[in-house]
Amino acid sequence: MSFRESYLLWKLAYELISSGRYQLIYESHNGKELWLEKVEGHEEADLIHLNQYDLDWSNWLRQHTDLSIDQALDIKQSLYKKNLSVLNVYITPYPPVDDGFAPLSEWYHPTDSPGLSWYTLILDQADQDKTLNIISQMSGCKWKQPFLITPDEHDVLQLREYTKQWATHQRQTIEKTFQNGKPIFTYLFVAIQLAVFAWMELEGSSEDPRTLLEFGAKFNPLILAGEWYRLITPIFIHIGVLHLLMNTMALYYLGTLVERIFGSVRFFFIYMIAGIMGSIASFAFSPNLSAGASGAIFGCFGALLYFGMLQPKLFLRTLGYNIFIVIALNLALGFAIPGIDNAGHIGGLVGGFTATGIVHFPKKFRFFTQIIFLFLTFGIGAGLLYSGAQNGVKAEEGTYLAQMAQGYVEEENFEKAYKLLNSYDFDNGEPSADIYFMMSYIEIQWQQYELAATHLKKVIEIDPKYHQAYYNLALLYYHDGKIEEAYEFATQARDIKPNDEQYRSLVDELTQFVGGEL
C-alpha cells in the first residue's frame, strides 16, 4: 500500500505552514482537501488548495475544479479581497487516463469570476520533482527537508500531527492578539459616565446648559478664560438619556475590543488622548457648548484603523470592512444632523490613531515610528489649540452666555450670573451687547447705577437698535433726576419699537416734566 499521496499532502501543508508564509483555513471532512491562505509575501499565490485524489477521468477533474472555484469565490468574499490568486494542486499517482484535461502553464482567469486568477498543477509520480519546484516558486517557500521517496504510515501520521500543531499555534497566536488585556478601564469609564449623569440629574438636568457648564462641559469662552480642564471633563458628561445610552453602548463594544487588543494601560492612554483631542478640535472649529464621550469613542475607531494598517489580513479576517462603513456612516450622520459636533468626532478619530502609534502593540516596539507619532500628536494638538485661541470669542457665544446667565438671574442668583458673565474675554472676544446688557441688569439690582449706565452705553455702541438698553438708561437717568437725558433715551426706545406700551407710557410721563421746564 502506497502512502505517497497522503504523505505529500501533509508534507506540503507542513512546509508551507511551518515556514510562516501560509496558514490553514479549511480542512475537508474526508481530510483530502486543504485550503491555505498566504500570511506574508506579495508575489506568491494568495491561496493554495491541496487535493489528494486518484484522478481517473478528466471530466471529474473539470467538475471538481469548478466546485473549487466556487469555494475560492466564497473565500474571496469573506476576505474582502478584490483580486485573489489560487494555486490549485492535485496530488495523484497518475494523471487522468484520457486527454480531456491539460495542466495549465500560465494563470487562468475564469470569465464568470472577476478578480480570480487560477493555476492548476497535477503532482503525479512522473513529474514530482518538477512540480514541487513550481510549487516552491509560486509559494515563496523553500523546502526545509527533502521529500521522502518511500514514506510509510508513521511518516504520514507524524506530519499530519506536526501540521495540526503548527495550525493550532497560528490560531492561538491570532487569539492572543485579542487577549492582551481585560476590559478594566472600559467598565470603569462606563461606570464613571453613568455616575456623573446620575449626579447631574440630581443637581438639575443633564440637558440644562447651566448644569452642563457647572459639571465642566466644553465652552470656548470659559476655556479661553483659563478653564482648560474643560478639554478633559466633557469626556464623561452626556446631554440627555439618549446621548448617554448611545455612547455607553458604543464604548462597551468598541472599548472592550480595543482594550483586549492593546492592553488596559495602552487603552487608557488612547481613550484619554482621543477624548482630549476631540475636545481640542471642537474648541478650534465649533463655538457650541458640547460634551460627550463621542470623541474618545471615535478614538477607538482610530485605534482599530491603526491595527488594520499594521495587520491588514488579520484586521479584514476578524473585523472586515464593516468598521470603515460604521465610521463613514457616523461621520455622515454628523454632517447631516444639526447639533452633532463632528469636529470633535474627527479630532477623536485622528487622536486615537496617533495615540495608538505612540504606544504601539504590547511587547512590541518601533522606537523611531513611535517618536514620530508622539511629535505628530503634540503638533496636531498644539496647532488646533492655537487655531482655537486665535478665533477668540464670537459675539454669538456671548449671546449664549448671557442666556445662561439669565437662568441664574431668574433664580435671583446674581453672584453666579455675574461671575459667569465676567468669564467672557472682553479684551480679545468680539464685543457682545447681550453680555453688557445682562451685566447692567445685575448692577441695577445691586444699585450700582453708574456702572450699569456705563455698560448700557456700551450696548448701544455695539447695537444702536438695542431698544431695551435705551429704556433702562432712561429709567436710570429718571431715577437720578436727569429728566432731559431720560426723555431722550426713552424717545429713542419708543422710536425703535413704537408699539411697546411701556416705552410709550414712559415717554408720555417724561413729556410732562420736559414740557413744564420748557
Image: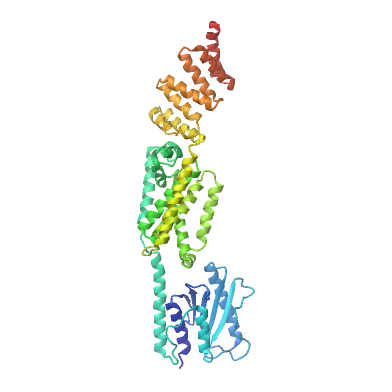
Q: How is the image coloured?
A: rainbow
What residue is shown at x 52% (from left), y 23% (from top)? Answer: 468
Residue 371 picture location, percent across and down: 41, 58
Q: Nearer the viewer, residue 137 or 99?
A: 137
Residue lying furthest right in this view? 111
Q: How many marks?
A: 0
Q: State whether residue 487 is above or below residue 353.
A: above
What residue is shown at x 52% (from left), y 79% (from top)? Answer: 138
Residue 496 picture location, percent across and down: 58, 22
- The picture quadrant where one finds residue 144 is bottom left
Residue 409 picture location, percent across and down: 43, 28
Query: Quick one: quadrant of the N terminus?
Result: bottom left
Q: State whether residue 499 is above or below residue 128.
A: above
Query: Quick one: quadrant of the C terminus?
Result: top right
Residue 96 picture location, percent across and down: 58, 89
Q: State whether residue 153 is above or below residue 428.
A: below
Residue 99 can be seen, yes or no? yes
Q: Nearer the viewer, residue 242 or 142?
A: 142
Residue 498 can be seen, yes or no? no
What residue is shown at x 49% (from left), y 36% (from top)? Answer: 397
